[in-house]
Amino acid sequence: MSLRSNPLDELSIPDGTTVEEHDLVTDGDVVIGGRSTIEFGVRGRNVLAGEGVEFGGDIEAEADCRLDMWCDVAGNVLVGRDAYLGERVHVGGQLMVSGDLDIGDDVDIEEGFEANGWIVIRNPMPTIVFLFIYLSQLLRIGEEEAAEELFGQFAESEDPESEPLLIPRNATVSDDAWRVSTPARIGDGCRLHGNVRAESIVVGEDNNIFGSLRAREDILIGSGTRIHGDVTTRNGTVAIADDARVLGDVSCGDLELESGATVDGSMRASGQVELKQDVSREQE
């Protein structure tokens, strides 16, 4: 990832992400931009949330959990290592921390807390804020190689095969809808509930999405994916790969269908309609 790119400029859902009984579950890290509303509970490795994020359930972090100021968690917060809670964070249940607890002023934990390590009461600076302040200083003094090395070390995951779940600022995620004002990218093998609303949408292979897709720009649907709803874009292209199925209507500018794609409802395209043949099948 380039230092000049913003890691939260899209909704990025990694491979294998699922919604299980009102919990959003992923194997990797979860990073949530400020002022977002997550009506699910969240389970991941490290959970990092920006200012004013609201959670509708529990947070379970296998490693660290960092909640910036004014975050609100309706349920419990269970942390496998260290926890960092900013000023005026509210936890509706218990806070259980296996490691150290760094906690800000006026934090409200309704059902008490327990930490096995050190407890420090102050206003901790979120990791992401500290990282970018340090990176900015390195770049300002011309130490680009050192900045690249630091960023690479931060970006390296304990499990390099697990990409983080990234939710941009001001997003809303619920059983009803995933609403963002940025592009959205969904990996492979995911099982999600809710309509997806984004600037553009790319869906990988072998997913089950129980909801519709709506975007201003292009929508791409990978092989083996099932969309249990309509697919709509104002002026963009909808491309549906071989063995993908849309259990609803498709409305778009241009429409591209591979030979094994299926649409159960009506198809309306204001522009071109292209039927693509699978070259590999023809050769067989």
Image (cartoon, helix red, strand yellow):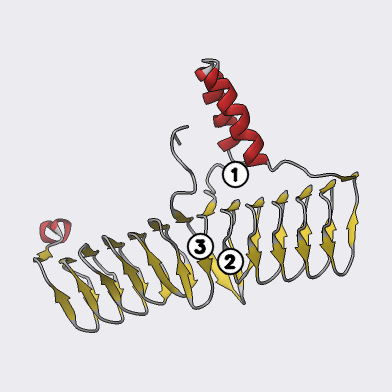
Q: Quadrant of residue 108?
A: bottom right
Query: What amino acid is found at the position of numbered circle 3 in the picture?
Result: Ala
Residue 149 position (above or below residue 17): above
The residue sitting at 28% across, 61% down in the picture is 220
- Residue at 84% x, 56% y: name it: 106
Identify the image quadrant of residue 261: bottom left
Please give left or right for residue 252 compared with residue 178 in the image.
left
Q: Amino acid at mark 1?
A: Asp
Label located before the other in sequence (1 or 2): 2
Q: Which residue is rendered at x = 47% and y = 73% of the image?
A: 177
Q: Nearer the viewer, mark 1 or mark 2?
A: 2
Q: Which residue is identified by label 1? A: 159
Compare marks 3 and 1 and give the one earlier in the sequence: 1
Quickly name the residue at label 2. Answer: 37
Viewer-nearest residue: 107 or 32:
107
Residue under circle 3? Answer: 171
Mark 2 neighbour class, 10 Å CA radius: few under 14, some 14 to 19, many 20 or more: many
User: Amino acid under label 2?
Assistant: Thr
Work out how far the residue at label 3 is from the one at label 1, CA to CA, in angstroms: 26 Å
